[in-house]
Amino acid sequence: MNQYDGKTPLGEELEDALGVTIENVIAEPEPEKTREQMLEDELNHLKDQWLRALADTENLRKRSEREREEARKFASAGFAREMLAVGDNLRRALESCPKIDELPASVQSLISGIEMTERELLAAFERQGIELLDPLDEKFDPHFHQAMSEVADASKESGTILQVFQKGYVLNGRLLRPALVVVSK
């Protein structure tokens, strides 16, 4: 390729290479568009804008519908988290009781009442889409479990949950509270 030697103007090299002069390119007027062509171009432009606006509106409608559905499904998440503590306390109360056969009748009815309250709370959770995670002997999943420690255990496969400190919960498939677990290594 020829290099510019500083003597020949660059425009002349381009004119020679392309076979046209800059004056001819500048001087050639663009052919006039007829009124029909201009109206057709405008119609195509407006049709394109209309189709884009229609698509944007449809996308907005779908996104709003998805957001409304998510808000409906997960609106109770804050309240549900607070109620988990109530369920945990009911379970701790039941686990701390001695054998029910050795207790007086009045205490036995109190314990039965606590058991019924816990069952009713868990049933209400289930009706609202809150599911219990009790992952004992399952494979550890960091999306649903929080490892508190690892313990060497040759009898179990690595990554198996050996102990559950606190059960977890999911609300409509979304994690509400992870299960606190001990994992084999």
Image (spheres, grey):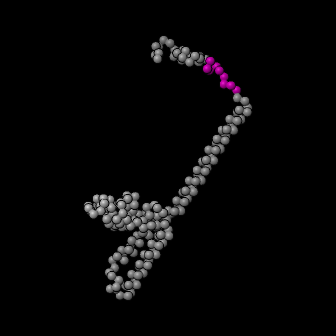
Residue 185: which quarter of the image?
bottom left
Q: Is residue 4 above or below residue 173?
A: above
Viewer-side residue, 158 vs 11: 158
Residue 153: which quarter of the image?
bottom left
Residue 11 appears in view: no
Residue at 39% across, 81% down: 111
Q: Report x, y in % for residue 46.
A: 67, 40
**Residue that extends furthest to the bottom in the rendered view of this protein:** 105
Q: Report x, y in % for residue 172.
A: 48, 63
The residues colored magenta run 24-32
**Residue that extends furthest to the top in the rendered view of this protein:** 7
Residue 97 appears in view: yes
Residue 30 is left or right of residue 136, and the answer is right
Residue 174 is left or right of residue 12, and the answer is left
Q: Report x, y in % for residue 6.
A: 47, 13
Residue at 39% across, 75% down: 90
Residue at 47% across, 70% down: 125
Total numbered labels: 0
Q: Is residue 150 above or below residue 100?
A: above
Q: Is residue 81 magenta?
A: no
Q: Report x, y in % for residue 110.
A: 40, 83
Residue at 44% across, 64% down: 170
Q: Is residue 114 above or below residue 75?
A: below
